[in-house]
Image (cartoon, rainbow, N blue to C red):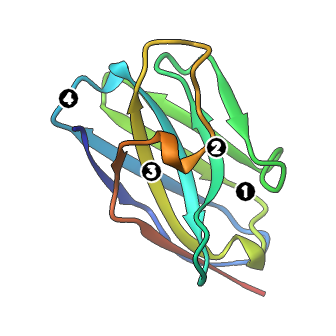
Amino acid sequence: QVQLVESGGGLVQAGGSLKLSCAASGRTFSNYAMAWFRQAPGPEREFVATINWSGGTQYYADSVKGRFSISRDNAKNTLYLQMNSLKPEDTAVYYCAAVYSRSSRYVPQSKTDYRSWGQGTQVTVSS
């Protein structure tokens, strides 16, 4: 399995920006579709954004569309999430996740499809 480590979380005021990073190791990063999920206090981990192995296909949750941008640098084995116009309801622990896929069509949005997870990074947006 690929190992994942998130970074870049922190405390920011509403309307501000943060950029999360997810460093991958242990496997060929470009063989994996990647995603960001988040979990506020409570049982549900919700989908945020996903990107295919090449970066050419991306999907976003409606709640973040137009504010968040997912990207990847396969040469650096790193996934990113640029978060702009942050809102208090974006407060959560953010996780990156990976699933083996070289398909542009298989870019899952369900957490049950992902096999590798990072430990998470806390994002807190104050009002």
Few, some or many C-alpha atoms within 10 Å of disc 3 (few <14, some 14-19, many ≥20)? many
Q: Position of residue 114 (x, y in %)?
A: 44, 42
Q: Give the answer, above or below, for where 104 lies relative to 74.
A: above
- At x 76%, y 48%, the residue is 61
122 displayed left or right of 65: left
Alpha-carbon distance for marks 3 and 2? 10 Å
Residue at the far bottom in the pictured view: 127
Among numbered discs 2 and 4, the one appearing first in the sequence:
4
Amino acid type for the residue under numbered disc 1: Asn
Amino acid type for the residue under numbered disc 2: Ala
**Residue 27 badge:** 4
Alpha-carbon distance for marks 1 and 4? 31 Å
- At x 34%, y 19%, the residue is 31
Judging by the rendered image, the residue that carries numbered circle 3 is 96
**Residue 84 badge:** 1
Among numbered discs 3 and 2, the one appearing first in the sequence:
2
Alpha-carbon distance for marks 2 and 4? 22 Å
Q: Secondary structure at mark 2?
A: strand
Few, some or many C-alpha atoms within 10 Å of disc 1 (few <14, some 14-19, many ≥20)? some
Amino acid type for the residue under numbered disc 3: Cys
Among numbered discs 2 and 1, the one appearing first in the sequence:
2
42 displayed left or right of 22: right
Residue 23 location, quadrant: top left
Residue 46 location, quadrant: bottom right
**Residue 49 badge:** 2
